[in-house]
Amino acid sequence: MAHAWPEQIRDGLLTMQYRGRRQSATSHYPDARIDIIVIDGEEAGWLVLARTDEAIQLMDIALLPERRGTGTGAAILETVIQESKETGLPIRLRVMVTNRAGRLYQRLGFCRIGGDEVNHEMERLPN
């Protein structure tokens, strides 16, 4: 949808959204790691993880529209799942009820452990 906005408006709003998401992640988890996802030498999205003694917190995963639905997100999440298995830590996340990614998380073994009518809290155990 943002691609249809005038460039001057789009760039400003997307920059504000990016800064807000980044600030939210790092305010709750100052040691959160923000990685740019690179595929075939091109930036394709980002992944934000916070690792604590209790869990791997998936703060955010975002892919460019052309990378969605191609298995890229599942492949990235499989690397996080492998880390979970190696460390024995569960993976936890929040996802909006309306976000299609919720189905992907369920397919990969995440279960709802809480939340409300807007957001689901989900967890995947390491086993």
Image (cartoon, rainbow, N blue to C red):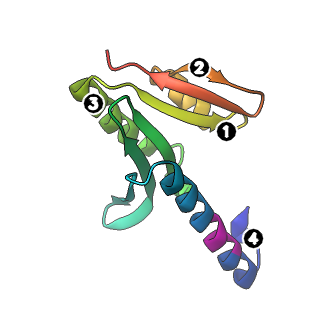
Residue at left 31%, top 62%? 40
Kindly report the distance in space between the C-alpha atoms of the residues bearing marks 3 and 4: 38 Å
**Amino acid under label 2?**
Arg
Residue wearing tag 1: 99
Reading the chain from its start, which is encountered first: label 3 or label 4?
4
Residue 74 appears in the figure: no
Reading the chain from its start, which is encountered first: label 1 or label 3?
3
Reading the chain from its start, which is encountered first: label 2 or label 1?
1
Say if 114 sits above or below 25 in the image.
above
Residue 94 drawn in magenta = no
Question: Alpha-carbon neighbours of circle 4 within 10 Å: few (<14), some, or many (≥20)?
Answer: few
Looking at the picture, tell me which residue is in the foreground, 30 or 96: 30
The magenta stretch spans which residues? 13-17
Q: Position of residue 51 (x, y in %)?
A: 35, 40
Kindly report the distance in space between the C-alpha atoms of the residues bearing marks 2 and 1: 14 Å
Image quadrant containing the C terminus:
top left
